[in-house]
Image (cartoon, grey):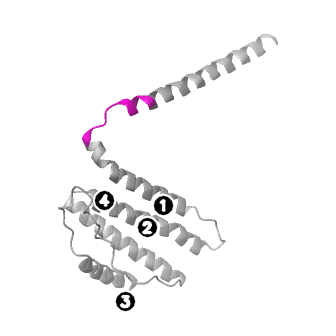
Amino acid sequence: MSKSRPIRHMAVIAALAAAAFSSAALAIAQDATPSQAPVSPAIQAEAPYLSENDAAMTKMMNDMAVKPTGDVDRDFVEMMIPHHQGAIEMAQAYLRYGSNEQLKRIAQEIIVDQQQEIAAMRLALGDPLPASTAAPTQVDTTSVSNSSNQNPSSSSSAMSGMSMMKMKMGN
């Protein structure tokens, strides 16, 4: 019996190794197949948006990885600010490339709301606020094919944002 046990173990190890190599080969083959397949024009048109969105997500995830300081309040804010900034950048990308007017309004609201929450978190910690600027709800769409889409003026969005900020902060 003792001789058959090592043989069984070797057979199991060999089978597992073969399965692992087969899985790796299959994965490589599958990766090669989509890149050779033709990509639809719709997917190609969406590529700039997907690229910007992916860059925003990657930056957000990297910036959220903060080293703990021992101050839960500060650590929370230091993780949440990049999270909110990521939402702002994703909403800006949508404004550049999206076409649904209702979603564009929501994206504008996301930008204003997230900026207000960043400011509120900084104030809660006693940190100074950066210089006041208009909410970036307007994006330069001159280089984008759907540049005929129009957004409300940034000054009215900024004023609306300031009013909302005062309401949220109780002023």
- Residue 79: x percent and y percent? 53, 66
- The amino acid type of the residue labelled 3 equals Asn
Q: Relative to 90, is 156 above or below?
A: below
* Label 4: how many Cα within 10 Å (few below 14, some 14–19, many 20+): many
Label 4 or label 2, whichever comes before in sequence order: 2
Between 88 and 117, the residue placed more toward the observer is 88
The circle on residue 60 is 1
- The span from disc 4 to disc 1 (Cα, nearest Å) is 16 Å
Label 2: which residue? Answer: 85
- The span from disc 3 to disc 1 (Cα, nearest Å) is 31 Å
> How many marks on residues?
4
Q: Does residue 95 appear left or right of residue 58 in this picture? A: left
Between 131 and 36, the residue placed more toward the observer is 36
Q: Which residues are magenta?
A: 32-41
- Residue 13: x percent and y percent? 69, 21
Q: Residue at x 27, y 47 (%)?
A: 45
- The amino acid type of the residue labelled 2 equals Gln
The single residue placed furthest to the right in the displayed view is 2
- The amino acid type of the residue labelled 1 equals Met
Magenta run includes residue 73? no
* Label 3: how many Cα within 10 Å (few below 14, some 14–19, many 20+): few
